[in-house]
Image (cartoon, grey):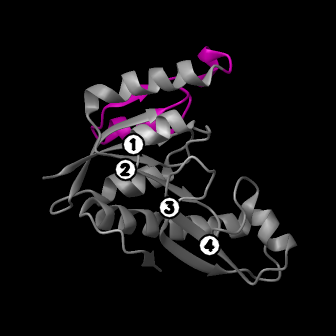
Amino acid sequence: MTKRVAILISGGGSNMVSLVDSMTSDHPAQPAVVLANSDQAGGLEKARSRGIPTEVVDHRDFKGDREAFEKALFSALEPHRPDIVCLAGFMRILTPLFIDAFKGRMLNIHPSLLPKYRGLNTHARAIEAGDTEAGCTVHEVTPELDDGPILGQARVPIFPDDTPDTLAARVLTQEHKLYPAVLRRFAQGDRTPVFL
């Protein structure tokens, strides 16, 4: 049975596009909805142009009340009956209540080689540490930030003249390959990590 995928975004949605565009022909999943936490998210129009339903739940309407925000997220997602939730640049920290509702069914992509550099500013931190490589990780979402089981990683070299922006661009290219590869395997019930 084809799995229904909800993709949550906050911005331009480049990872969402790579996921959606990979879900064709014999893929074990299909996009069910793209949800953003702002109607200004550029990815919404990209989803609509691909014929995918969209939803907006603006976090600013909830004035820091995470529980109310997440209840609204549930309400927006429920009609689309997602089997899998993919966070693709969704810049809100979710509570255990929301995460547990999708336990074992929620994925995230993070721009570092976890467990290194959880949180923000990952590229600057890797350069400052003198690392020779960086990359990205797809992991299962658990209540601990950027800490669930690793389902895939892709590595890129760090060059002496790299800036956080040049490194981010190189990592993003790998994110667009890794996330679809992991989703395909995950939707088939296979949690064996993908390494690129």
- SS of the residue under disc 2: loop
Q: CA distance from mark 1 to mark 4?
A: 26 Å
Q: Residues within 10 Å of mark 3 (few under 14, many from 20)?
A: many
Q: Amino acid at mark 1?
A: Phe
Q: Residues within 10 Å of mark 4 (few under 14, many from 20)?
A: many
User: Viewer-nearest of labels 4 and 2?
Assistant: 2
First in sequence: mark 3 or mark 2? 2
Q: CA distance from mark 1 to mark 2?
A: 5 Å
Residue sitting at 46 percent across and 22 percent down? 71
First in sequence: mark 1 or mark 4? 1
Check contact, mark 1 vs mark 4: CB within 8 A.
no
Q: Residues within 10 Å of mark 1 (few under 14, many from 20)?
A: some
- Residue assigned mark 1: 102
Q: Amino acid at mark 4?
A: Gly
- Residue assigned mark 2: 105
First in sequence: mark 4 or mark 2? 2
Q: Where 85 falls versus 169 (above or below)?
A: above
Q: CA distance from mark 3 to mark 1?
A: 14 Å
What is the magenta range?
36-64
The picture places residue 159, in percent across and down from the top left corner, at 76, 82
- Residue assigned mark 4: 135
Q: CA distance from mark 3 to mark 4?
A: 13 Å
Q: Amino acid at mark 2?
A: Arg
Check contact, mark 4 vs mark 2: CB within 8 A.
no
